[in-house]
Image (cartoon, grey):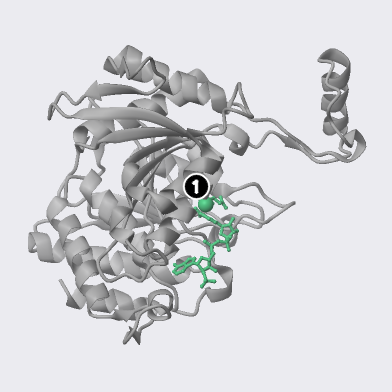
Amino acid sequence: MYQHIKVPAEGRKITVNPDYSLTVPDQPIIPFIEGDGTGVDITPVMLKVVDAAVAKAYGGQRKISWMEIYAGEKSTNVYGPDVWLPEETLQAVREYVVSIKGPLTTPVGGGIRSLNVALRQELDLYVCLRPVRWFTGVPSPVREPEKTDMVIFRENSEDIYAGIEYAAGSENAKKLMKFLTEELGVKKIRFPETSGLGIKPVSREGTQRLMRKAIQYAIDNDKPSVTIVHKGNIMKFTEGGFRDWAYELAQQEFGAELIDGGPWCKIKNPKTGRDITIKDSIADAFLQQILLRPAEYSVIATLNLNGDYISDALAAQVGGIGIAPGANMSDSVAMFEATHGTAPKYAGKDYVNPGSLILSAEMMLRHMGWTEAADLIIASMEKAIMSKRVTYDFARLMEGATQVSCSGFGEVIIESM
Ligand SMILES: NC(=O)C1=CN([C@@H]2O[C@H](COP(=O)(O)OP(=O)(O)OC[C@H]3O[C@@H](n4cnc5c(N)ncnc54)[C@H](OP(=O)(O)O)[C@@H]3O)[C@@H](O)[C@H]2O)C=CC1
Ligand SMILES: O=C(O)CCC(=O)C(=O)O
Ligand SMILES: [Mg+2]
């Protein structure tokens, strides 16, 4: 079976039904990746908090059998020097359907390509879902953080993240440059000899499967709008294509009707009868509007790079990246992870906020239909924040706070259950 993954003796697999709903046993086996950097701090705390919430919510009737799988630096220790993402890790994520991961390091410039992106691409986890909302008591740089309540649907499989890039001066860059200049008549590359080149694939299928999920989410959760965020004025056939294909999907599949001749349009929510406005915003303008008029935005559908930037910007608006959860999803497989990275300067210091990963686990429990345990995590997280016993990131901005460690914050959450 597996070479290094130890399958727990107790527990069963979660399975996917033909309609993509899940069958979740009372003792599911859930794979987790510890993660690099602060992964060693936050992942054990997340496991402890989830176990406590599940025990409290179901009195021993339900329990998670955690199964460690490997990626990143830990994988190179287990599998050998150059094995950053073993095939059996991908296999386990596919096979066990629901999993959770800590952050993984990606070097800047040279070195390995992102393992986080590789996981998303290999498993075709095409939706990066990142809800952003304020918790009462969290210090925020804006005056009315409660007005920020958005859910980002970031396209997770295309765009410049596809990794089609050639280093300046490399043979491939030269070949591509020759093709561009000689075959396509490109004359606008300012310094051809010293340019690195990247290619940005964006497709109708990729856009529309993402937009379908975003609209369905707005319907299921009675949200007032879906905003398509793009830079289609400049990148006409990639970001502009994204905008046009997203509107096209809204009209063709959801029967959206144009407002004042378009392109904005609206759908009547079949579940509530309320209107859902489908609109778009150019990314730079969007970034100032979310600060100045956040209440006007709800569900956001955007491309990979925009979604990456927007995730951290919005997280900051509601108190920072310490409580910014997320999920990477295909129609069947879901892998939950925080929005933040490995924060290397804090690695192993039991210091950072485990909140993002704990809230990612909360999303995971909700996805599994374990809503009582998920609700318990939200309620106890709120109580913990209100008690002002918080990690450094909140403590430095909160008056009268007592700073606690990463594991200490986990304890405060568990005490508050
Ligand atoms: N999905 C993933 O696995 C991701 C991986 N990465 C990778 O992580 C590495 C480091 O990236 P970097 O750009 O420094 O971004 P990080 O998100 O790791 O850290 C940036 C800053 O965010 C704050 N922060 C991060 N995590 C926490 C936390 N748990 N609690 C409180 N504050 C936190 C810290 O702010 P302060 O300094 O103010 O205390 C930190 O210095 C890179 O290799 C990058 O590629 C990045 C993003 C996602
Ligand atoms: O893969 C990485 O290292 C960074 C990814 C990232 O920033 C993100 O997904 O938000
Ligand atoms: Mg990011």
In the image, what residue occupies the spot 8% across and 57% down? 61
Closest to the observer, 227 or 183: 227
Q: Is mark 1 within 8 Å of ligand 3?
A: no
* The furthest residue to the front: 260
Q: Residue furthest right?
A: 193
- Which quarter of the rendered picture does the N terminus lie within? top left
Image quarter (top left, top right, bottom left or bottom right) of the C terminus: bottom left
Q: Up-down: is 43 above or below 180?
A: below
Instruction: Please name the residue that numbered disc 1 is placed on.
Output: 287
In percent of width and height, residue 246 lies at: 42, 23
Side of 167 relative to 395 (left or right): right
Please tell me which residue lies in front, 292 or 351: 292
Determine whether 239 is above or below 58 in the image: above
Residue found 20% across the figure and 38% down from its top: 221
Mark 1, Cα crowd under 10 Å, few <14 / some 14-19 / many 20+, is: some
Whether residue 8 can be seen here? no
Q: Is residue 43 above or below residue 363?
A: below
Is 65 in front, or is 287? 287
Query: Residue 20: horizontal and vertical position, in percent?
Result: 25, 29
Residue at position x 21%, y 61% from top? 378
* Amino acid type for the residue under numbered disc 1: Leu
Side of 199 where 10 appears, left or right: left
Across and down, in percent, residue 27 comes to 19, 52
Depth check: 35 or 173 in front? 173
Residue 341 location (% of width, % of height): 51, 60
Q: Is residue 329 left or right of residue 302?
A: left
Q: Say which element carries label 1.
A: helix
The answer to whether residue 19 of the structure is visible from this angle is yes
